[in-house]
């Protein structure tokens, strides 16, 4: 009997604690829902406004499109014409895809060389790459754009070479970090069996590097796709997507906000689709890049 | 093996090396040299000593941009990290839909600076018009607009890094603390926080450098208006180069100063990371 009276209050208490934690769980859940709404709301607003007339975008941006303010696809048609959207999209896609491929191929070979060939100059190159990551773009922007002009790199193909140079810092840094942990024996065995360095690289090293290559590819793709200043300085008249969007801002700050909203929607959709398709890789890649870099 | 690899160095190293030289090393060295000269293109530079630096430091726009950038960086580093850490704490407790929340919160980070700037220009102007103002009416609006934008972009990203850190906290320690009767506040400050120190260092570093070097968002949201009051350092340097004839040398001097500040921040941060690594 004495035992029973002693235990019942305790049981009651644990039940209460459980109930309490359930209640706080609900509070937390609601808080998260609210934050999620705050995160998503701006994008919904942009989509909503992309279907409204110019005046309504600035006078009442938080209202749903009504019969009066709805303009159908006019903003889209207007915007696409004004900034030659599909051309800009193609230019951006071309530059991003080929820059990323070139960066992955060249910097992984370079990083392999840096790790496996022990010499003062490989060490120096590695340190310079690490150093380049902390240098702000403004420091080199003017001389770089002039040199690109002199060497005729100021076009869609030349800019890929420039991106290789700018992307080298982070890419070499991440690749060397990984290759250092790969045992040398496999490569040596391959070489003794008669594989040349190139075959060893493509058959043995490259497959091992795959996870890091995905990380590098995602980080570089995000950067190049969204980059505004470098292509503005190098390309001039050929416009990438961010350049085309910035171009909608006329002289002295006047912006056609309706066409702008439509173009923002078109610019965001591919990013979100890409993100939803490979969000696991993207989140992992970005975190890996941040933690090592 | 090294011998064989060296033979192939023209293919293995040369492309990256050449691009790195042309895009970074040569412009970097030229840039330092040009900051001591007067020029309009790289071919007509004339040595003028430190006068560019004197002009830069006595340039009101530059000093204003420096302070604006520092204030913005301090405010956004604190707000972003606090919010991100709180969200990470919420999401590491077993709650339904954790993954969905993570995916949603991270998404804004993928959107580019120019696009972000115009999204928030629409929203902020939409709110301010109820008070008869726009974002360019007052520099304060521009300042807080940039802070809100930066939070929206980076909180989710930092949150993911904090989550990884919190998940690494050893459950044994927390259990031991439970047995000893520690409150959740004590557990947070005495166990979780010290253990996620590496994540805090990384996140502070990323938010610090990203805020300090901000350009696209600044250009799209306010472009420095009203006047040049909301112009940050990167934008001020750009405008000095391309907006003012004969001031390219001063622009380059400003860029060198900017580089020195960013490098100093980065190295200080690195030093702290190292000292933390020794401790643990």
Image: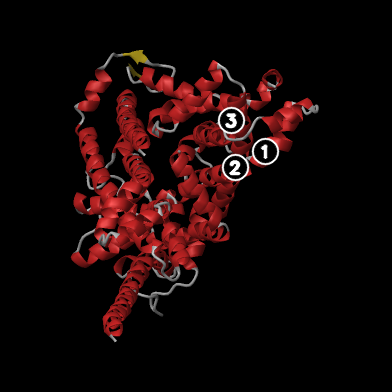
Q: Is residue A104 above or below residue A30?
A: above
Q: Are marks 2 and 1 in contact (CB under 8 Å)?
A: yes
Measure the C-alpha gap from mark 2 to mark 3: 12 Å
Q: List x then y, in percent, for residue A276.
A: 54, 61
The reply to whether residue A213 is in sight is yes
Read off the residue under disc 3.
A111
Give SS at disc 2. helix
Read off the residue under disc 1.
A206
What residue is at 44 percent from the left and 71 percent from the top? B96
- Chain bearing mark 2: A
The reply to whether residue A154 is in sight is no
Answer with mark 2 or mark 3, whichever residue precedes in sequence: 3
Q: Where residue A213 is drawn, which disc sits there?
A: 2
Residues marked 2 and 1, same chain:
yes
Give SS at disc 3. helix
Q: Is residue B133 above or below residue B233?
A: below
- Chain bearing mark 3: A
């Amino acid at each position: 009997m004495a035992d029973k009276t002693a235990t019942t209050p305790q049981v009651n208490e644990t039940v209460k604690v459980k109930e309490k934690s359930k209640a706080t769980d609900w509070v937390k859940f609601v808080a998260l829902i609210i934050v999620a709404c705050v995160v998503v709301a701006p994008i919904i607003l942009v989509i909503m406004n992309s279907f409204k007339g110019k005046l309504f975008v600035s006078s009442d941006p938080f209202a749903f499109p009504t019969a009066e303010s709805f303009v159908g696809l006019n903003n889209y048609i207007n915007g696409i014409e004004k900034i030659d959207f599909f051309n800009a999209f193609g230019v951006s896609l071309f530059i991003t895809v080929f820059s990323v491929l070139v960066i992955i191929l060249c910097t992984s070979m370079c990083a392999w060389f840096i790790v496996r060939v022990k010499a003062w100059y490989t060490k120096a190159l590695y340190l310079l790459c690490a150093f380049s990551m902390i240098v702000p773009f403004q420091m080199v922007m003017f001389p770089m754009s002039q040199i690109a002009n002199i060497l005729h790199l100021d076009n869609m193909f030349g800019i890929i070479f420039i991106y290789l140079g700018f992307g080298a810092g982070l890419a070499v840094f991440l690749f060397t970090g990984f290759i250092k942990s790969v045992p040398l024996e496999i490569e040596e065995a391959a070489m003794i069996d008669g594989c040349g360095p190139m075959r060893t690289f493509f058959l043995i090293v490259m497959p091992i590097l795959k996870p890091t290559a995905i990380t590098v590819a995602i980080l570089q793709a995000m950067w190049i796709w969204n980059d505004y200043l470098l292509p503005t300085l190098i390309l001039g008249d050929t416009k990438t997507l961010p350049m085309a969007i910035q171009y909608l801002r006329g002289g002295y700050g006047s912006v056609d906000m309706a066409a702008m909203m439509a173009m923002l929607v078109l610019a965001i959709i591919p990013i979100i689709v890409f993100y939803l398709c490979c969000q696991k890789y993207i989140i992992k890649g970005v975190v890996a890049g941040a933690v090592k870099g | 093996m090294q011998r064989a690899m060296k033979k192939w160095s023209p293919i293995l190293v040369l492309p990256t090396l050449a691009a790195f030289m042309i895009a970074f090393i040569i412009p970097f060295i030229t840039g330092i040299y040009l900051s001591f000269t007067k020029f309009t293109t790289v071919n007509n530079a004339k040595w003028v000593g430190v006068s560019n630096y004197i002009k830069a430091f006595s340039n009101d726009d530059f000093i204003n941009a420096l302070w604006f950038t520092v204030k913005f960086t301090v405010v956004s580093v604190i707000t972003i990290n606090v919010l991100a850490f709180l969200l990470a704490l919420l999401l590491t407790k077993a709650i339904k839909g954790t993954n969905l929340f993570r995916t949603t919160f991270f998404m804004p980070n993928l959107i580019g600076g120019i696009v972000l700037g115009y999204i928030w220009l629409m929203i902020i102007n939409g709110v301010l018009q109820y008070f008869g103002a726009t974002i360019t009416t007052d520099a304060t609006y521009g300042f807080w607009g940039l802070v809100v934008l930066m939070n929206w972009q980076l909180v989710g990203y930092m949150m993911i890094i904090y989550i990884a850190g919190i998940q690494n906290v050893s459950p044994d320690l927390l259990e031991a603390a439970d047995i000893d009767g520690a409150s959740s506040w004590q557990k947070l400050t005495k166990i979780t926080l010290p253990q996620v120190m590496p994540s805090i260092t990384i996140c502070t570093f990323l938010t610090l450098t990203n805020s300090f070097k901000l350009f696209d968002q600044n250009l799209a949201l306010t472009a420095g208006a009203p006047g040049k009051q909301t112009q940050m350092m990167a934008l001020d340097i750009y405008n000095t180069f391309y907006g003012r004839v004969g001031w390219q040398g001063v622009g380059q001097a400003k860029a060198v100063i900017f580089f020195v500040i960013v490098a100093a921040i980065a190295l200080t941060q690195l030093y702290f990371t190292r000292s933390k690594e020794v401790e643990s």
